[in-house]
Image (cartoon, grey):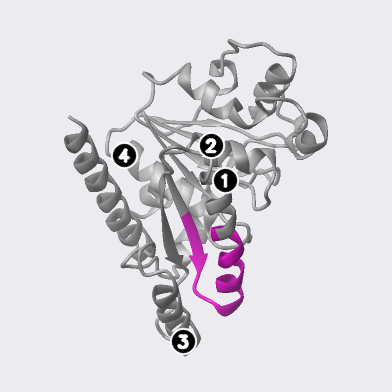
Amino acid sequence: MKIWAVSNQKGGVGKTTTVVTLGGLLSSWGYRTLLIDLDPHGSLSSYFRQNPDETEASVYNLFHSASRKQKNYDPRPYIMNTEFANLSIMPASTAIATLDRQVAALDGMGLVIATALAEIADEYDYVIIDSPPMLGVLMINALAACEFLLVPVITEFLALQGLDRMVRTIQMVFKSRKQPPDFKIIPTMFDKRTKAAIKSLHTLRDSYPKNVWGKFIPIDTKLREASSAGVPASIYDPTSRAVAGYSDLLDELLAKNRVVKSAVS
């Protein structure tokens, strides 16, 4: 099982869209895929018609179990199948917004998700975590659990400023890991018709040459239509420009995974 996290400390950059679209592609390509919503806003959960204000079985239950020192808690009761083959979700509850106040001082709370996923390592091929846009116990869990990190960044000036803060957070959190995971910055919502977007893309590549993906996700109204329909864009319209971009990204990620696996073997 491979675990990816999608994170940025700025909202509105295409984080949840990236999680859903990559998850939809993985599942349609035959990979057993689990999506985890760690964002108190619950956008990922809402995408799949789960109400974060009403759900009783959610990722919050895992943290509640951990806070009670239940060492071998089972994440399966909090995982829900979607209507799409090979695609499951662990939804969020708005209650997770209170976790920093409730459990941050307790030992081991940064490894709750990693510990839970170890229980089901043979049941999924890929896990993608939707991380919250603020540093706290939830983001720490996402970064601690992941083997690869994706950082979506909208191609505009203000988003680039926020990226500096996210990169510092990554460096701080990964410093304690013996083998820090790689991270890839994904330019999103790129509009080739505007000079501002073109300039922002060039600035992004100049500032982070080793970590920026060589392509970009174009602006595409099909993503919004897919969200309204509650269907991953890769299933809603496989021929859309944005899906083509995400397909290229996923091809690269899977190829990288095969190279790493071959090297280890």
Q: Do the residues labelled 3 and 2 touch (CB within 8 Å)?
A: no
Residue annotated with mark 2 = 144
Dominant SS of magenta comes to: helix
Quarter of the view holding residue 86: top left
Please state which amino acid type lies under the numbered disc 3.
Thr
Label 2: which secondary element: helix
Tell me the CA gap for discs 3 and 1. Answer: 36 Å
Front residue of this view, candidates 108 and 46: 108
Residue identified by numbered label 3: 194
Q: Position of residue 127 (x, y in %)?
A: 43, 34
| Residue type pointed to by label 4 | Ser
Q: Earlier in the sequence, mark 3 or mark 2?
A: 2
Please determine whether, in this image, residue 53 is positioned above or below residue 244. Answer: above
Nearer to me, 202 or 80: 202
The picture quadrant where one finds residue 46 is: top right
Check contact, mark 2 vs mark 1: CB within 8 A: yes
Q: Disc 2 and disc 1: Cα gap in Å?
A: 8 Å
Q: What stretch is highlighted in magenta?
A: 151-167
Disc 4: which residue: 28
The residue wearing badge 1 is 173
Local crowd size for mark 2, using a 10 Å CA cut-off: few (<14), some (14–19), many (≥20): many
Query: Closer to the observer: label 4 or label 2?
Result: 2
Q: Quadrant of the C terminus?
A: top left
Of the residues under marks 4 and 1, which one precedes in the sequence? Answer: 4
Residue pictured at 34% horizontal, 65% vertical: 241
Q: Distance between the residues labelled 4 and 1?
A: 33 Å
Percent position (x, y) of residue 213? 35, 63
Q: Earlier in the sequence, mark 3 or mark 1?
A: 1
Q: Is residue 140 magenta?
A: no
| Amino acid on which disc 2 is placed | Ala
Would you say 176 lies left or right of 41 here? left
